[in-house]
Amino acid sequence: MTKLFASCAAALLLSASVASAQGNGSDITGPSVTQSTIAGGIFAPSAGNVGTTAVPVTPAVSNAIVSTSNSIVATVSGGGTITNPVTGAAIPAAAATVAVSMMSSASPEIKAQVNNALSTSGASATVINTLMSTLPNLLSNPTPGQVAEALSAFNAVVNTANAGFLANPPPEFSAIFSVLSQIAASGNAAAKGR
Amino acid sequence: MGRDRILRLTAVCAGVLALAALVRPVGAQDLDSLRRRYQLAQLPSLEVASSASRSSPGNSSGSPSAYGANFGDGFAGLSYQESTRGGNTGDGSVSVGFGLLNSRDLIGLEVAVASLSTFREGFGQRGSISAKLHKALPKNYGVAVGIENLTNWGGTDGSRSVYGVVSKVFHLREREGDPFGTFTMNAGVGNGRFQRIPDFQANHDNINFFASGGLRVHEAVSLIADWTGQDLTLAASIVPFRWAPIVISPGVADVTGRDGNSARFVLGIGAGFKFSSVRNIFIPR
């Protein structure tokens, strides 16, 4: 591969003749149009996920997610109740607060509490850590593609969790599930124009 | 009596069966069922977007980068100068480009077709084709060699320039979208327009160095310092929309005023995309 790269590079170099006549160089004294840097850093490598970090395509989806996130934060902050969509059971207020905190500022104490809850799932530490890394700021200041990454990471935990955990999940897990399911539902509804 | 015994026996059996159902260990079928109930529906529009584009502010203004377009990638852009170097009037060029092969698997080839001096002379009156071979390396390094203005029509005052460049992205935060999340550096050598201004104007064929760095101070904004080999450009690069990969990069060129030149306002506007998903970017559903 190195040889191939070197050969192609040599071919390019050999094909270049001596510089042609210059004027004032106006063709090259502004931002370069001779390569993709004019389009920003879009082709530079991204943090471990080259080509997979997403941007919300539609403003409608983005707006729906933000609106739902704000609504959840307001509900929990105001002492309201969120429920586990699977069991229908109300989630303890303390657990709901932990989930919202985890998806906002995510203090070390909150991270430790959530990590302890998830560690009983039977999922690997890698899978749990991936989910843990996608949750902070999800409700307060999500990056492009973070919601999609969080949904994928949550599903990965579910797919490797044991039956006992899913049959009787800790309240922190139920709270995170409740929040993510509401966000996913609103985003999908917006994507379908509903 | 016999009927009572049958009823009691039936009740006992029903109780045993109910108890067995309660204490029965969860089987594979139940586990699958539980997992299905907790599965979250992925967002379809975001899945499309993930293969369509990702926006990122730039890390250079006039200098090359070792990163480039691969097969299926495309880009388009516009470059504007308030006044050309040593001149009194503005000018601007436009370009489109595409990638071939893949820099992660083997080698990427980026090709750009530019309409030069478009603001002064009109679209397509003068133009050039440039090419860059680029290779992605581990640890976010990249290396590339390229030729600017490999061929042209109508002439160019920018010369044909051969260069080699190395780039690296440094991740400074756990999430690159966080403030000061990444720093990207490009450094290389080249002839032609990368020479010092006196050498360039004297039509020499010397080699000179260039370097640029972009600090991503915000998810959508980076600050750029770019030594093009001839002078310093300071610029910002901004991604104004989350839903479209448009990048706007205003800056000031010739900051040091070498060889008697004055600082000038310059502006770049461009977008990168996957050809297969252009519709999803520019025509939101």
Image (cartoon, coloured by chain):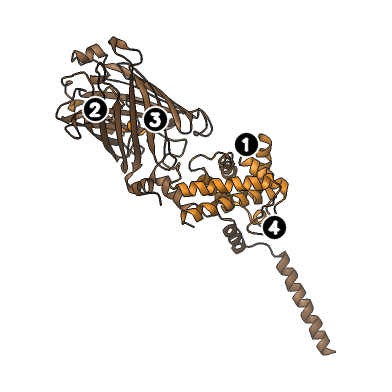
Chain colours: A orange, B brown
Three-letter code for the amino acid on which mark 1 is drawn:
Ser
Q: Do labels 2 and 4 share a chain?
A: no
Q: Residue B203 carries which label?
A: none
Three-letter code for the amino acid on which mark 2 is drawn:
Glu
**Alpha carbon distance from label 1 to label 2:** 47 Å
Q: Do labels 1 and 2 share a chain?
A: no
Q: Earlier in the sequence, mark 2 or mark 3?
A: 3
| Proximity of marks 4 and 1: CB atoms separated by less than 8 Å | no
Q: Which mark is residue A105?
A: 1
**Alpha carbon distance from label 3 to label 4:** 48 Å
Circle 1 chain: A
Q: Which residue is drawn at 31% across and 29% down?
A: B144
Circle 3 chain: B
Callout 3 secondary element? loop
Q: Do labels 3 and 4 share a chain?
A: no
Residue placed under numbered mark 2 in the picture: B148
Which circle, 1 or 2, is nearer the viewer?
Answer: 1
Residue nearest the observer in this picture, B236 or A22: B236
Question: Is A66 above or below relative to B145?
Answer: below
Q: Residue at x 27, y 19 (%)?
A: B194
Circle 4 chain: A
Can you give x and y, in whole percent of width and height, for residue B107 in the image?
Answer: 31, 36
Q: Which mark is residue A89?
A: 4
Mark 3, Cα crowd under 10 Å, few <14 / some 14-19 / many 20+, is many
Q: In which quarter of the image is residue B225?
A: top left
State the residue lying farthest toward the left: B154
Three-letter code for the amino acid on which mark 3 is drawn:
Gly
